[in-house]
Amino acid sequence: MNREPTIINLAMATKDTEYSQLIPEGTTKLQIRSRNMNDIKLAYVEGESDTNFITIPAGSTGKYLENFEMNDKTLYVQFADGAVADVLEIEVWK
């Protein structure tokens, strides 16, 4: 049963820069979205957020994952072209 929510705000200030966020151990549900309505490039491997990524479209409810267990996993993200700065909002449940 998912009982403990955590909110992570990852500030992304520079275009064409990959940012990383370690997901807390024991996470079973997660939602990711842009606070400033920008496209976000999401990768699961360091260095791939500009080459091998999933786009979280601007204005969407974000990327939602559930029914999994994530341990020691880092997400790699950057905002798409045209954005000046953004905050990645991540909600995780353990």
Image: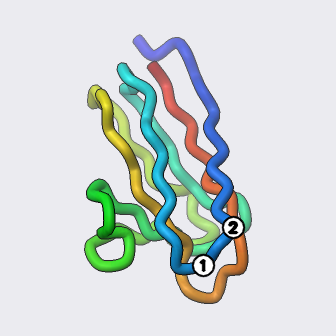
Quarter of the figure with the N terminus: top left
Q: How far across and how far down the image is residue 79, in percent?
A: 55, 72
Amino acid type of the residue tagged 2 in the rendering:
Ala
Q: Which mark is residue 83?
A: none
Which residue is more in the foreground, 79 or 66? 79
Q: Which residue is mark 2?
A: 13
Task: Tell which residue pokes out farthest to the bottom in this image.
Answer: 82
Quarter of the figure with the C terminus: top left
Which residue is rendered at x = 63% and y = 88% of the image? 82
Would residue 71 be found to the left or right of residue 10 on screen? Answer: left
User: Residue 69's quadrant in the figure?
Assistant: top left
Q: Kindly indicate whether the residue at mark 1 contacts the one at mark 2 (C-beta within 8 angstroms).
A: no
User: Residue 74's quadrant in the figure?
Assistant: top left
User: Vertical placement of 61 versus 48: above or below?
Assistant: above
User: Residue 35's quadrant in the figure?
Assistant: bottom right
Q: Residues within 10 Å of mark 2 (few under 14, many from 20)?
A: some
Q: How many marks?
A: 2
Amino acid type of the residue tagged 1 in the rendering:
Lys
Which residue is more in the foreground, 19 or 80? 19
User: Vertical placement of 25 versus 59: above or below?
Assistant: above
Q: CA distance from mark 2 to mark 1?
A: 7 Å
Would residue 17 be found to the left or right of residue 47 on screen? Answer: right
Q: Residues within 10 Å of mark 1 (few under 14, many from 20)?
A: some
Which residue is rendered at x = 63% and y = 68% of the image? 59
Q: Which residue is mark 1?
A: 15
User: Vertical placement of 79 versus 69: above or below?
Assistant: below
Q: How far across and how far down the image is residue 54, in percent?
A: 35, 68
Q: Secondary structure at mark 1?
A: loop
Which residue is more in the foreground, 91 or 11? 11
Which residue is rendered at x = 32% and y = 67% of the image? 47
Q: How far across and how far down the image is residue 53, in percent?
A: 32, 70
Q: Secondary structure at mark 2?
A: loop
